[in-house]
C-alpha cells in the first residue's frame, strides 16, 4: 500500500495509494513527508501532462504566509501558472454567502475545465475548496494540501466536501475525490499544541478501531508525536491514512457501512460540540471525550474486557483537553445532551445504534444500546475508575 523514498532534501517521503475500483483513473496518491511540498510538481505531472493545462487556482488560508509562499514557489518552478485566493479559515468559510464570490473569482480568472484547484489549509479550507471544485463547471480537479494535523490524518482524504447550513453542520456537499494529496509535516511546526492534541484524537481512533500494534506505538510515542518529531509524524500519518484509504476505497460513497467505524467516538463527540455551540472544544478534543464514552459503553455492554477498557481510558485521560461542562451535573442539561445524541442516530424501539469496541483494534456494531446503558457508561467515564482489571 505504501512506499518510501528519499526526497531531494534527503528526507523520506512516504506514499499511500487510494485505489478506486473500477474507475482506475480516479485513484490517487497521498504523499507524506517533511518538506514534501517542494516535490509537488513531480507528482502533478500525471494530473497535467501538457504544459498548456498547468493552470492552478489556490484557495489558501490567508494566515499561512510561509506555506503559501512555499506552494507558490514550488508550482511556479514546475511550470504552473498560479492564481491565489486568500481566505479567512474556519467555519465562517463553510457558508454559501462566503464562498459564492469565490466562484466569481474563478470565472474572472478564466479558470477552465482543465484548471486545478488547490486547497491550502485545514479542514475548513479543504471542505469548502473541495466543494467549489465539485460544483464549478460541474466539477474540476482539485489537490489537497492540508496544513493541520486533523486535515492530514483525516479530512483531506475521502472526498467528502461541503459547507454548513444554519440548521446544521455539513448538510450541503458532494463526494468529490481529490487528484492528489500532499501532507507536508513541516507545516505542522506552527500549529498550536491544542490543534496537535485535537488531531491526535483522530489518529488514536485508527489504532483503537483497526490496529492494535499502531495503538501500542501511539501509547509509546505520544510525546515524540506531539513534540513534532518528523519521523514520528510521518509514520503515524501514513499509518492513519493507509487505514482511511482502505475504508474509503471499499465504500467510496459511505453507503455500505464500511466507513461507519470511522465514526467511533463521534456520537457523544458531536453532541458535546453541539451542546456547547461549537465554542468550547476543537473537533478532535470532543472526539477524545467521545471515545472515552464509547470505551465505557463498550465495557458496560459487555463487549470489551475491563483490562483493555482501563488501559485505553488511562491513556486517553492523560491527554490535555478541556474538561466536560460542569452543567452536565444538572439533570436538565444532561437530558439535553442525551437528546442531542439520540438526534444524531437512528433510534428504534428506544434502542440506539453504536460502533463499539470488542477489543483494542476491533469494532463491533451494537443496535441494542438502551438508555440505561448510556447512563451507566456516562457514570463509568466520570466516576473514579477503581474497577479491578
Ligand atoms: N471532509 C471530511 O471528511 C472532514 C472530516 C473531519 C473534519 N472535517 C471538517 O474539518 C474542519 C476542521 O478542520 P481544522 O481543525 O483543520 O480546521 P481549520 O481549517 O478551521 O483550521 C483550524 C485553525 O488552524 C489554523 N491553521 C491551519 N493550518 C495551520 C498551520 N500550519 N499553522 C498554524 N495554524 C494553522 C487555521 O487558520 C485555523 O485557525 C471542520 O469544518 C470539519 O467539519 C471534515
Ligand atoms: Zn472526526
Image (tube, grey):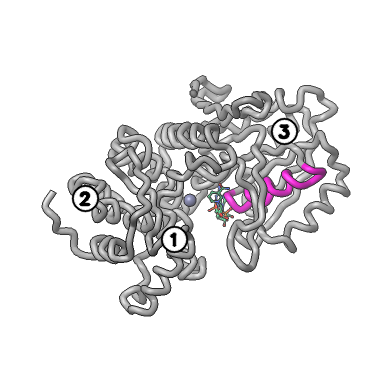
Residue 137 drawn in magenta = yes
Q: Which mark is residue 347?
A: 1
Q: Residues under labels 2 and 3: Cα distance?
A: 49 Å
Q: Nearer the viewer, mark 2 or mark 3?
A: 2
Q: Which mark is residue 75?
A: 3
Q: Is residue 67 visible?
A: yes
Q: Is mark 3 within 8 Å of ligand 1?
A: no
- CB-based contact (under 8 Å), mark 2 and mark 1: no
Q: Residues under labels 2 and 1: Cα distance?
A: 29 Å
Per the picture, the main secondary structure of the magenta-coloured stretch is helix
Describe residue 46's horizontal placement relative to residue 308 as left or right: right
Task: Indicate whether 261 appears above or below 22.
Answer: below
- Residue at (29, 64) in percent of width and height: 378
- Residue at (37, 71) in percent of width and height: 325
- In the image, residue 385 lies at what x, y percent? 18, 59
Residue 339 drawn in magenta = no
- Residue at (55, 27) in percent of width and height: 17
The magenta stretch is 122-138
Q: Which class describes the residues within 10 Å of circle 3: few (<14), some (14-19), or many (20+)?
A: many
Of marks 2 and 3, which one's residue comes earlier in the chain? 3
Task: Indicate whether 90 appears above or below 253.
Answer: below
Describe residue 196's horizontal placement relative to residue 103 as left or right: left
Q: Which residue is mark 2?
A: 310
Q: Which class describes the residues within 10 Å of circle 1: few (<14), some (14-19), or many (20+)?
A: some
Amino acid at each position: 500500500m505504501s512506499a518510501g523514498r528519499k526526497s531531494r532534501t534527503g528526507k523520506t517521503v512516504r506514499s499511500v495509494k487510494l485505489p478506486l475500483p473500477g474507475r482506475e483513473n480516479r485513484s490517487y496518491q497521498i504523499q507524506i513527508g517533511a518538506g514534501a511540498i517542494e516535490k509537488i510538481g513531480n507528482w502533478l505531472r500525471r494530473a497535467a501532462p501538457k504544459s498548456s493545462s498547468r493552470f492552478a487556482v489556490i484557495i489558501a488560508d490567508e494566515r499561512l504566509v510561509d506555506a503559501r509562499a512555499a506552494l507558490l514557489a514550488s508550482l511556479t518552478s514546475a511550470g504552473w501558472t498560479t492564481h491565489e485566493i486568500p481566505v479567512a479559515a474556519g467555519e465562517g468559510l463553510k457558508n454559501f454567502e462566503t464562498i459564492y464570490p469565490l466562484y466569481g473569482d474563478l470565472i474572472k480568472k478564466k479558470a477552465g475545465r482543465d484548471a486545478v484547484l488547490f486547497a491550502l489549509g485545514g479542514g475548513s479550507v479543504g471542505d469548502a475548496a473541495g466543494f467549489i471544485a465539485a460544483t464549478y463547471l460541474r466539477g474540476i480537479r482539485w489537490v489537497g494540501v492540508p496544513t493541520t494535523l486533523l486535515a492530514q490524518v483525516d479530512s483531506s482524504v475521502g472526498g467528502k466536501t461541503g459547507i454548513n447550513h444554519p440548521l446544521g453542520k455539513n448538510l450541503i456537499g458532494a463526494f468529490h475525490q481529490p487528484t492528489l494529496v500532499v501532507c507536508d509535516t513541516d507545516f505542522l511546526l506552527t500549529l498550536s499544541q491544542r490543534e496537535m492534541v485535537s488531531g491526535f484524537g483522530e489518529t488514536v481512533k485508527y489504532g483503537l478501531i483497526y490496529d492494535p500494534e499502531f495503538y501500542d506505538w501511539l501509547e509509546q510515542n505520544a510525546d515524540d508525536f506531539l513534540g513534532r518529531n518528523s519521523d514520528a509524524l510521518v509514520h503515524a500519518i501514513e499509518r492513519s491514512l493507509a487505514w482511511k484509504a482502505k475504508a474509503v476505497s471499499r465504500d467510496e460513497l459511505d453507503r455500505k457501512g464500511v466507513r461507519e467505524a470511522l465514526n467511533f467516538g463521534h456520537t457523544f463527540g458531536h453532541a458535546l460540540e453541539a451542546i456547547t455551540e461549537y465554542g468550547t472544544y476543537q473537533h478532535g478534543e470532543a472526539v477524545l471525550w467521545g471515545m472515552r464514552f464509547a470505551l465505557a459503553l463498550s465495557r458496560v455492554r459487555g463487549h470489551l474486557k475491563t483490562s483493555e477498557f482501563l488501559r485505553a481510558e488511562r491513556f486517553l485521560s492523560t491527554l490535555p483537553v478541556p474538561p466536560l461542562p460542569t452543567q452536565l451535573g444538572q439533570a436538565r442539561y444532561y437530558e439535553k445532551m442525551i437528546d442531542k445524541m439520540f438526534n444524531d442516530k437512528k433510534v428504534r424501539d428506544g434502542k440506539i445504534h453504536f460502533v463499539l469496541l470488542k477489543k483494542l483494534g476491533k469494532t463491533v456494531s451494537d443496535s441494542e444500546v438502551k438508555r440505561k446503558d448510556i447512563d451507566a457508561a456516562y457514570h463509568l467515564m466520570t466516576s473514579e475508575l477503581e474497577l479491578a482489571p
